[in-house]
Amino acid sequence: MAGLDVANTRYRENPFKRNWLVTASWLVLLIYLLYSFNSMGLTWERFSHGLDIADKLMDRAFPPNFGRWELLLSGLAESLEIAVIASVVGIFLSLFFGLFAARNMMPNWITVPMRAFIAVCRTFHPVIIAILFVKSVGFGALAGILTLIVASIGFIAKLFAEAIEEISLKQVEAIRATGAGFVSVTLFSVMPQVFSRFIGFSMYQLDSNLRNSTMVGIVGAGGLGGTLFSAFQRFDYDFVAAILITIIALIMLGELLSNLVRRIFK
Amino acid sequence: MTSAQANLETAPFLEIKGLKKEYTQGNPILKGIDISINQPGIVAIIGPSGTGKSTLLRCINRLVDPTAGQIMLDQADMGKAKGQQLRNLRRHVGMVFQEYNLVERLTVIENVLTGRLGYMSAWQAWRRKFSQKDINTAFELLDSVGLTEHASKRADSLSGGQRQRVGIARAVMQDPHILLADEPTSSLDPKTAVEIMELLERFADDRNIPALVNMHDVVLAKRFAKRMIGMSDGIVVYDGSPEGITDDHLKQIYGGESWLV
């Protein structure tokens, strides 16, 4: 072990030495956390008082009251319709917007404005978009549908564009060499490479739209959210519980459906 | 095909005049190429890497736009064609690639059929509406390259040699008046390489069309070529029979001599 002895005589830096910048950052975060708790008056007493209120709410919420099931079902049906229409239209538009935003397929003068448009669609939370649409097209499902179309474009058009930017251009070149036009080249060399990922993104967006379709009603854009909001305001907590359980069932159903679709298109 | 027969042709298969290409200005890759292809059969283009062999082939079917020069094909200037005219000319130029460039997620037969896309409208392509004649031709071609039993397999499940056979079938499916092959054997083992060259030779002979083949393997090129073109530094330095090429020519083309044995 002579070699080791030689090494021991020389000073070697510990590769895992403490980084003072990181340590200081953690310390700052900890201090800010304590300060925030303090400034908002979040004490243990406040928390246990909150638990009492929650206990009363639970008492009134259970058992859930499905008595007004007709109202519940019509709200659910509207939410489902909003989600499906918005998903189909949004995904269809995103196919084109994604293609136009892909920098390996289109020149800059198309991709730059397209990317800006997609970014704007993604800028605002769906609640804000929903309020804007309720104000501009009036109360009801149309506002909800438009909201979720915009939200869908904001997310999956970007994901589509990125998927297209990652394809192998060799396959595209080969199809172009056959004399095929732009549409045929896209159909036969771009789409086969991205199709299964598109299905995945689309299912994710359907799932997301199902969830959001129950929310847009809170601001008056149609669907189960409106029913939920008025039940809250009238302190019908047992009906609120029934609505929440229904929403859970809806999302579960969406999950099952998307798994099924994914399996079909694998 | 004898030269007497070739003389009967009113125009050569392909006539390239003064072809220049610069990717960046002032840095030409092709410095004025003049080639006239008058006879069918394999024409091997040899030369070191980076000398513009690929660029030359890609200029012919305009995957790369030439900077200057004329490329006469079917009595039209391929170099200046645009839009629909370019695509109509392109479909008569079959191209075979070094890395096969098959659409991996399509099946073998679908890949062969993509050779017909230049003859179809976008609407027909969208509906996958290939004519029965094309479908029959595709299966016959697949049969002639020996891959009938692989027709419905996905292209990415094939071996390299099999993929290149599909690549050739796709090019021939275009009903080409000329074949271009960009180092079609460089990714393959020696035995498969010979088989691929035999296949190219067979299609060129059967259809009485020329096949321009970029190659690195001088011995393989001499074995199959009816004519050899040696390129070095963006110009043609040898153009003639394979028998006529000497060690001196090879030294001029590749530089140095230590690699010659």
Image: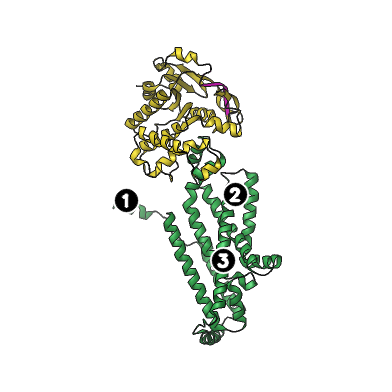
The chain letter corresponding to yellow is B
In the image, what residue type sits under mark 2?
Ala
Task: Please state the chain letter of the residue tagged with numbered disc 3 in the rendered image.
Answer: A
Give the colour chain A carries in the figure.
Answer: green
Q: How packed is label 3: few (under 14 Cα within 10 Å), some, or many (20 or more)?
A: some
Q: Residue at x 36, y 55 (%)?
A: A8
Residue B23 appears in the figure:
no
Q: Are marks 3 and 1 on the same chain?
A: yes
Q: CA distance from mark 3 to mark 1?
A: 75 Å
First in sequence: mark 1 vs mark 2 = 1
As drawn, the label of residue B122 is none
Tell which of A237 and B183 is nearer to you. Answer: A237
Q: Inspect the magenta stretch and tell me whether residue A236 lies in it.
A: no
Q: Are marks 3 and 2 on the same chain?
A: yes
Residue at image mark 2:
A101
Q: Nearer the viewer, mark 3 or mark 2?
A: 3
Identify the image's colour scheme: rainbow, by chain, secondary structure or one colour: by chain
Where residue A86 sits, quadrant-wise, is bottom right
Residue A106, image x and y in percent?
60, 44
Residue at image mark 3:
A81
Identify the magenta region.
Answer: B10-21
Tell me if residue A170 comes above or below residue A100 in the rendering.
above
Q: Main secondary structure of the magenta part?
A: strand
The quadrant of the rendering that contains the C terminus of chain A is bottom left
Residue B230, image x and y in percent?
46, 21
Tell me if residue B165 comes above or below residue A103 in the rendering.
above
Q: Nearer the viewer, mark 3 or mark 1?
A: 3
Which secondary structure lies at badge 1? helix
Residue B20, image x and y in percent?
58, 25
Residue B5 appears in the figure:
yes
